[in-house]
Amino acid sequence: MASTAEPVLEARGLVKHYPLTRGIVLRKQIGAVKAVDGVDFSLGRGETLGIVGESGCGKSTVAKLLCHLERPTAGEIRFRGEDITGASGRRLKEVRRNIQMVFQDPYTSLNPRMTVGDIVGEPYEIHPEAAPKGERRRRVQELLEVVGLNPEFLNRYPHQFSGGQRQRIGIARALALRPEVIVADEPVSALDVS
C-alpha cells in the first residue's frame, strides 16, 4: 500500500557532471564526465531505498550530493518538502544534522589523530544542543555498545581496530544525532562477521 505522507527526502532530476578541461594557463572545457544524469526518487519516513549499479555508475556521487558534500550540476534535493539544493550557513547545518552519512571507506573517513570517543562525540561539538556536555561520554559509550563495540574503547585510535570495527565507529558517529535520514555508501562492505 502506497503511503500518502509527504516524503522525507526526494531527488528530482539530479545531475552531476565533472568538467574535462585542457590546458594549464588557459583552461578550456572539452567535455564532461556524467557521473549522475537525471536521478529521481522519493523516500518516505521509515522506508529503505537501495541504489544498485556497477562500480563507477554514480552511487557514491548521489550519496555525496544528498549530504551536500558535492553540489549538483542540475536538479533539486528536497527534505521534508523544502528545496535544500542551495542550502548554506545555518540552514545547511540543520539539514546535515538530519541527514548523516556512513562512508564507504571507514579508514579514510576517520581522523587517525582522534580517539574513538572524540570521533563519535564530534557531532555533539558541532550540534551542542543534541547532548549536554555532562552526558556526552555516556551517550558515546551507548552508541559504541549499539554498534557492537566495547564501550570502554573510547580512548583507542582508529588504527587499533579492524576494518569492520572502523565501519562500526562510522555508523555510531552517523547515529549520534538521531538523524531522520542515514545515507549509507556501501556500509557493510567493510564489516566483519564477528
Image: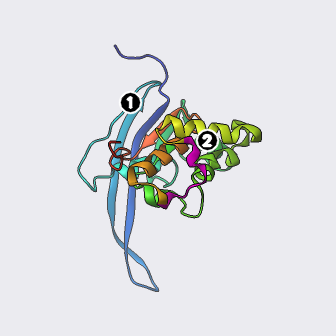
Overall secondary structure of the magenta stretch? Answer: helix
Say few, some or many: other residues with alpha carbon within 10 Å of mark 2 (under 14 / 14 to 19 / 20 or more). Answer: many
Farthest residue, direction top: 1
Whether 132 is drawn above or below 62: the answer is above
What residue is shown at x 54% (from left), y 40% (from top)?
144
Between 77 and 193, the one nearer to me in the picture: 193
Kindly identify which residue carries mark 2.
140
143 left or right, relative to 166: right
Can residue 59 be seen from the camera position used here?
Answer: yes
Q: Is residue 115 magenta?
A: no
Between 119 and 71, the one nearer to me in the picture: 119
| Coloration of the structure image | rainbow
What residue is shown at x 28% (from left), y 56% (from top)?
56
In the rendered structure, which segment of residues is drawn in magenta?
Answer: 151-159
Quadrant where the image shows the C terminus: top left
What residue is shown at x 32% (from left), y 48% (from top)?
189
What's the distance in space between the residues labelled 1 and 2, CA to CA? 26 Å
Helix, strand or loop status at disc 1: loop
Which quadrant of the view contains residue 114? bottom right
Between 97 and 84, the one nearer to me in the picture: 97
Q: Is residue 152 magenta?
A: yes
